[in-house]
Image (cartoon, rainbow, N blue to C red):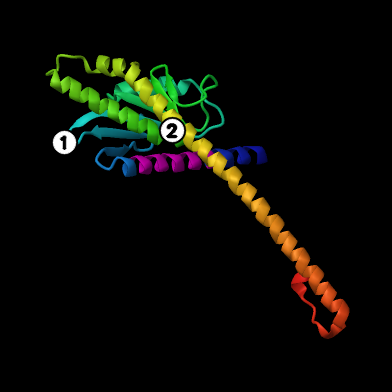
Amino acid sequence: MAEVMRRKMEQGSMQLQGEVMELALEELLRVTFPFDTIDEVAKGTRGADCVQLVRNNLAQVCGKIIYESKRTKAFTNEWIEKLKQDMRSQQADIAVIVTEVLPRDMESFGFKDGVWICRFSDVKALAFLLRDSLIKIYGAVASQENKGDKMQLLYDYLTGVEFRQNIEAVMEGFLSLKDGITREKMQMEKIWKEREKQLDKVLLNTTQFYGSIKGIVGNAVGDLKMLE
């Protein structure tokens, strides 16, 4: 009985954490893309957690991105197949899984079996790139007066050199920022250690000075509890 209760509590806790992650994802998208429409998929309704309708500067809908957030200890490929079904049923152009744990064959965000997969820390940068690709494809189709196939153009763009270079540029930026933060952290730790040693030296000298004075004048000098 106790084991069953513990499992139910853990399941409830994981579900709550997952809901918090969904809300954080929706808020991030709304703040980052204020002119897009960000809709939450109602609980119990089949489909992704969140839908983003991408709009250009003329407020024209250029495409749809769906997001599924996962907060579990292991990644399963069933999520990919399920989200691909949701993408077809919701007539979305792009599907994204936001997860804490990536597939074993992925070290960073990327494209796998028709679905984009990333961590929460990467979703903002990835959403920028995917959104930009939809706007470019919409403009290309419109300029050709619908002579081209939108999905084929989208596939060609996402698998082409330009998009790969954009991804590489974003990754380089992230890695550079991470290296900069690491260097700053190491430098600050070095400064803190030096200051800590200086403070220890000052405190030691002060204690020795106080001890010398008290040794000369005795109890005429009151006790300092801070130095005890």
Label placed on residue 123 = none
In this rendering, which labeled residue sits more in front, label 1 or label 2? 2
Type of amino acid at the residue the image marks with label 2: Gly
Q: Is residue 226 above or below residue 189?
A: below
Q: Is residue 17 above or below residue 51?
A: below
Q: Is residue 168 left or right of residue 208?
A: left
Q: Quadrant of the N terminus?
A: top right
Magenta span of residues: 13-29
Q: Is residue 28 above or below residue 140?
A: below
Who is closer to the viewer here, 174 or 32? 174
Type of amino acid at the residue the image marks with label 1: Leu
Determine the secondary structure under disc 1: loop
Q: Is residue 211 left or right of residue 174?
A: right
State the image coordinates of residue 196 (x, y, percent, origin top left): 68, 56
* Residue 149 in which image quadrant: top left
Residue positioned 39% across, 25% down in the render? 167
Give the mark, 1 or 2, whose residue is nearer the N terminus.
1
Q: Quadrant of the C terminus?
A: bottom right
Residue positioned 82% across, 77% down in the render? 213
